[in-house]
Image: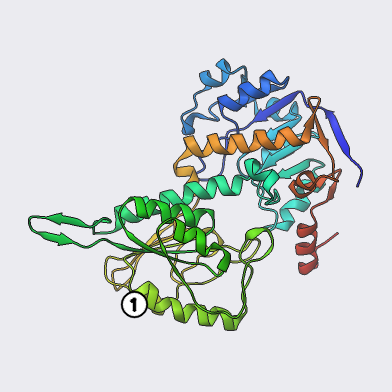
Amino acid sequence: MASCGIRTLMNVAVPRETAFNEARVALVPETVARLVKAGATVTVERGAGTRAAFPDDSYVQAGASIQDDPAALFGNADLVACVGRPADATLSAMRRGAAVLGLLAPLGDPQYVKLLAEAGVTALSMDAIPRITRAQSMDALSSQSNIAGYKAVLLAAVALPKFFPMLTTAAGTIPPAKALVLGAGVAGLQAIATARRLGAVVSAYDVRAAVKEQVQSLGATFLEVDLGVDAEGAGGYAKELTPEQIDKQRRFMVDAIGKSDVVVTTALVPGRPAPRLITEEAVAAMKPGSVIVDLAAEAGGNCALTKPGETFVTAGGVQILGEMNLPSTMPHHASQLYSRNVFALLGVIVKDNALHLDFDDEIARGTTIAHGGKIVHQPTLDALRETGAAS
């Protein structure tokens, strides 16, 4: 497909996020200063960075202007940089042909992409960036998952009524906690490393055999169960298993989970409900006081008893933390990393201070989900066809 573009990118707008419990901001002053130096005008909605410890004054010092009127902010914008999906008011205030960038989750809700296309905006999804070497600096999913894996273990350590490390005291020796991490992607590997730093004995399981060396390099034990196939799919994600493979996996997990003080689950399949790795039987096998932190809660949970957004204590005394949007609980660094991801992407799709989408480029093609009034993201089109809703 030939390259195409929109009018000169003169004004980048940064809104205050409106989603529940969202404290991050899309651009931090450090990045704003770099954009201004490159020739862009940056306008920030008042208070956009306050919850992430970036006050309005810091944006002014970086060269941005502060805007109180959302209609003026978004109506004059060539690019609106968001963390999550833009609010309805933001989208309605934007002019046709402008661009919006954020974690838009197109596969989770393809109907939303139709709305973006109908609004006539160019939609760039930070969670659709292809997972290739050249795009690592733009990989917002990885930067945010890294934070989630770290914070999950800290929450588990606070909730667990035991020490994580082994302690030798005058009153005797206390053995280390046993932590199990399910899923050894970015979040899982950070969870392993953090649990090890806190002194736990750590084991991990992943359906992808290729991650065994990474797990072992962090000092954890890699648990193996023969599923008869390597379950690594496109882009390094785990692919969906058959019902027979899932059943075999679950039965294997009951014993491993029952021996663990802490279980952190991180298994996700893009655009699909989270795989159920922890059955009620497995939870029942755990000792009272044990903790499960389910990082897949937003996609339904890896644990059968997870309650998204809540902490649930079973009759057997097992605590199940259905935490959602953990990166937002560390908004300063989460915003800083996300902002750098955005800047790296703009370095590819902005030429001569204008948005320039070359659809022969894998990054531009993969990231753009709507353009010129049409859905251009093939996975989203496929998802719509599955539901019979494709236009």
Determine whether, in the image, residue 201 is placed left or right of residue 135: left
Give the colouring mode of the picture: rainbow
Residue at left offset 82%, top offset 51%: 375
Quarter of the rendering containing residue 313: bottom left
Residue tagged 1? 285
> What's the residue type where badge 1 is placed?
Ala
Assess disc 1: are there few (<14), some (14-19) or many (≥20) residues with their C-alpha within 10 Å of its C-alpha.
some
Q: Give coordinates of residue 193: x percent, y percent.
A: 41, 52
Q: Give coordinates of residue 4: x percent, y percent.
A: 88, 38
Quarter of the rendering containing residue 174: bottom left
Residue at left offset 66%, top offset 62%: 271
Quarter of the rendering containing residue 78: top right
In the depicted structure, whether residue 44 falls above or below residue 231: above
In the depicted structure, whether residue 263 falls above or below residue 230: above
Q: Give coordinates of residue 112: x percent, y percent.
A: 72, 53
Between 270 and 183, the residue placed more toward the observer is 183
In the depicted structure, whether residue 114 falls above or below residue 56: below
Determine whether, in the image, residue 77 is placed left or right of residue 326: right
